[in-house]
């Protein structure tokens, strides 16, 4: 039995969690900075770093207190076997807070320090609630900074099938939300507003990338939304915002679902998983579910709280890294541009 403390601070969430054997969440504490960054219309890196340094000790303390031993007592450091931390990709100042904290704890306790790639963390979020899920499977990773269609060949090992040529899916949601006046954070606001709109009201282009059937491109769609708005403004027409964002969301979701289903069929996978903040999108979850049912493909996705940034996914990924013998030395640094 192995209890891992996960620490996550790559963007605007300070999070800590204890996970047993990579699968069982014993505690999950997330301190969100959304309220502060909303005033600025997006994440301000300098502010994020300062908030992490304020929040990180209380968040970790809470994660230990919430995690219970089999006898019902709260965990202490003696019950923790290793410390896993996100060391990239993300905002460098934000990452450094988590990395320095994890190093200090691991050094003081003489326990292993496990470096975790944030994106591998997002994929691993699926292991927390689906005990039978094991590689290999096909995974659509859709976050604020990444859009990748991959085969998860083994824990933390990937074969790339498709990637975005420009904006990430979450980035497109955030930019469109800003341009229609919904503000930050864009994804959840569009998701909510779209429920009152007609997704068939406006037909937006579905970008195909020549010669790369599984690659994505969202910048043309984003421009099409802006053009639609500008045109309406010039003509003095009022826009139905709910219809506009519902139609935009449908265009994103359709292409994500089509690519994933085609790839799963071509590569012969009967198990598909979703990962990353955009995997919390209700239209994507619904549409992917329907498509998978038709093709008799098993679909899994994390609960919304494990789709967006959290530390339980880092502790889960850390468990499998540790099992492979991947531990960090004391010179571990933040790597803002870390690749999968
Ligand atoms: O994975 P994540 O929390 O952070 C990164 O690693 O990037 O993803 C954040 C992204 C943001 O772009 C946010 O707008 C998007 O995920 N997002 C959503 C939803 N919830 C979060 N996009 C669409 N629908 C949602 N419900
Ligand atoms: Zn993330």
Image (cartoon, rainbow, N blue to C red):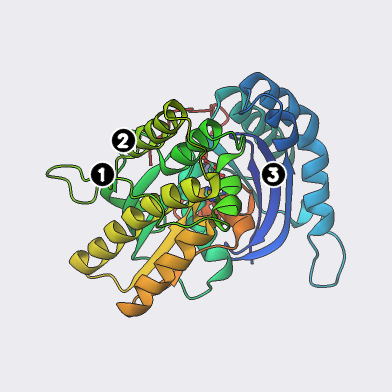
CA separation, marks 2 and 1?
Answer: 7 Å
Residue that label 2 marks: 220
Q: Which mark is residue 207?
A: 1
Give the number of the mark in front: 3 or 2: 2
In the image, 188: left or right of 54? left
- The one of 203 and 259 positioned closer to us in this rendering: 203
On screen, residue 22 above or below 166: below
On screen, residue 43 above or below 116: above
In the image, 23: left or right of 293? right
Cβ atoms under marks 3 and 2 closer than 8 Å: no
- The quarter of the rendered structure image containing the N terminus is bottom right
Decide if ligand 1 comes within 8 Å of the CB at mark 2: no
Q: Position of residue 216 (x, y in %)?
A: 29, 44
Decide if ligand 1 comes within 8 Å of the CB at mark 1: no
CA separation, marks 3 and 2?
Answer: 35 Å
- The one of 74 and 53 positioned closer to us in this rendering: 53
Q: Quadrant of residue 270?
A: bottom left
Residue at image point 48% right, 30% down: 236
Give the number of the mark in front: 3 or 1: 1
CA separation, marks 3 and 1?
Answer: 36 Å
Residue that label 3 marks: 15
On screen, residue 101 above or below 82: above
Q: Position of residue 338 (x, y in %)?
A: 42, 33
Which is more N-terminal, label 2 or label 3? 3
On screen, residue 105 above or below 289: above
Q: Is residue 128 visible?
A: yes
Instruction: Determine the residue located farthest toward the top in the rendered image.
Output: 46
- The one of 195 and 173 positioned closer to us in this rendering: 195
SS category of the residue bearing label 1 = loop
Residue at image point 47% right, 42% down: 170
Q: Position of residue 39 (x, y in %)?
A: 71, 26
Instruction: Determine the residue located farthest toward the left in the rendered image.
Output: 211
């Amino acid at each position: 039995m192995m209890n891992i403390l996960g620490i996550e601070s790559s963007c605007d969430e300070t999070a800590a969690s204890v996970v047993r054997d990579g699968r069982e969440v014993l505690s999950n504490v997330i301190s969100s900075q959304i309220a502060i960054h909303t005033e600025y219309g997006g994440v301000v890196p300098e502010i994020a770093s300062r908030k992490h340094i304020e929040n990180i000790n209380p968040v970790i303390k809470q994660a230990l207190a919430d995690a219970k031993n089999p006898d019902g007592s709260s965990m202490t450091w003696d019950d923790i076997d290793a410390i896993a931390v996100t060391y990239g990709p993300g905002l460098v100042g934000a990452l450094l807070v988590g990395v320095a904290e994890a190093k200090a704890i691991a050094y003081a306790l003489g326990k292993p320090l496990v470096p975790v790639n944030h994106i591998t963390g997002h994929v691993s979020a699926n292991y927390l609630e689906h005990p039978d899920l094991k590689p290999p499977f096909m995974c659509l990773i859709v976050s604020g900074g990444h859009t990748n269609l991959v085969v998860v060949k083994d824990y933390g090992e990937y074969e790339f099938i498709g990637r975005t040529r420009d904006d990430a899916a979450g980035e497109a949601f955030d930019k469109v939300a800003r341009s229609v006046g919904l503000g930050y954070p864009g994804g959840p606001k569009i998701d909510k507003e779209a429920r009152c709109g007609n997704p068939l009201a406006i037909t937006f282009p579905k970008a195909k990338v020549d010669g790369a059937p599984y690659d994505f491109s969202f910048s043309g769609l984003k421009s099409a939304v802006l053009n639609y708005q500008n045109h309406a403004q010039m003509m003095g027409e009022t826009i139905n915002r709910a219809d506009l964002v519902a139609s935009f969301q449908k265009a994103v979701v359709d292409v994500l679902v089509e690519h994933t289903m085609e790839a799963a069929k071509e590569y012969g996978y009967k198990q598909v998983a979703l990962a990353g903040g955009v995997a919390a999108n209700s239209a994507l979850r619904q549409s992917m579910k329907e498509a998978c049912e038709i093709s008799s493909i098993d679909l899994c996705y994390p609960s919304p709280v494990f789709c967006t940034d959290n530390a339980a996914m880092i502790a889960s990924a850390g468990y499998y890294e540790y099992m492979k013998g991947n531990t960090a030395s004391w010179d571990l640094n933040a790597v803002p541009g870390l690749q999968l």
